Image (cartoon, rainbow, N blue to C red):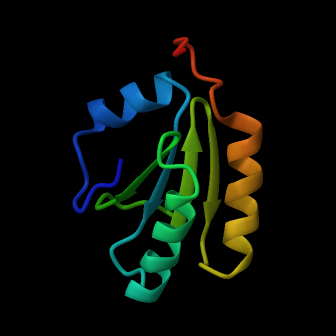
């Protein structure tokens, strides 16, 4: 799913347990880049979660999976290739099986 504001952490942990990939952005991320993230999200809305991160995340944008993170301090066009490769490697690898 897509969240307009950060959901409770417990919701995100549950999504990670089920093998989903969470894409998070810092509040300072430009709207243009957030719109591009939505495009990435729309490629696979079943396996991806898109949400802002309002904590003091040390990255501009990050993708997380169960036990793994791809964090980018700067948001460049390379982020999309990194996140697609990350998803390919870690999707459906959580500890709880989901048919």
For the point 66% across and 82% down, the residue is 76
- Residue in the foreground of this view, choosing between 99 and 51: 99
15 is higher (above) or lower (below) than 80: above
Give residue 92's position: percent from left, percent from top.
62, 27
Q: Position of residue 5 (x, y in %)?
A: 22, 60
Please tell me whether residue 60 is drawn above or below residue 32 in the rendered image: above
Q: Position of residue 50 (x, y in %)?
A: 41, 55
Q: Is residue 28 above or below residue 64?
A: below
Relative to 25, 92 lies left or right? right
Q: Residue at x 60, y 72 (%)?
A: 73
Instruction: Please identify the quarter of the rendering in which residue 52 is found.
Output: bottom left
Q: Is residue 59 visible?
A: no
For residue 34, side relative to residue 54 (left or right):
right
Quadrant housing residue 31:
bottom left
79 relative to 75, above or below? above
Residue at 31% over, 57% down: 55
Give whichever of 22, 46 is nearer the camera.
46
Can see residue 48? yes
Quarter occupied by residue 28: bottom left
Say whether residue 94 is left or right of residue 18: right
Residue at image coords 54%, 14%:
99
From the top left corner, tell me how far across and down residue 25 is, in percent: 43, 66
Total marks drawn? 0
């Amino acid at each position: 799913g897509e969240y307009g504001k950060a959901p409770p952490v417990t919701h995100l942990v549950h999504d990670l347990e089920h093998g989903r990939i969470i894409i998070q952005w810092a509040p300072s991320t430009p709207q243009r880049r957030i719109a591009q993230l939505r495009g990435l999200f729309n490629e696979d809305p079943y396996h991806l979660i898109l949400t802002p991160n309002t904590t003091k995340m040390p990255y501009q944008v990050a993708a997380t999976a169960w036990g793994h993170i791809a964090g980018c301090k700067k948001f460049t066009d390379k982020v999309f290739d990194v996140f697609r490769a990350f998803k390919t490697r870690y999707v459906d690898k959580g500890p709880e099986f989901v048919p």
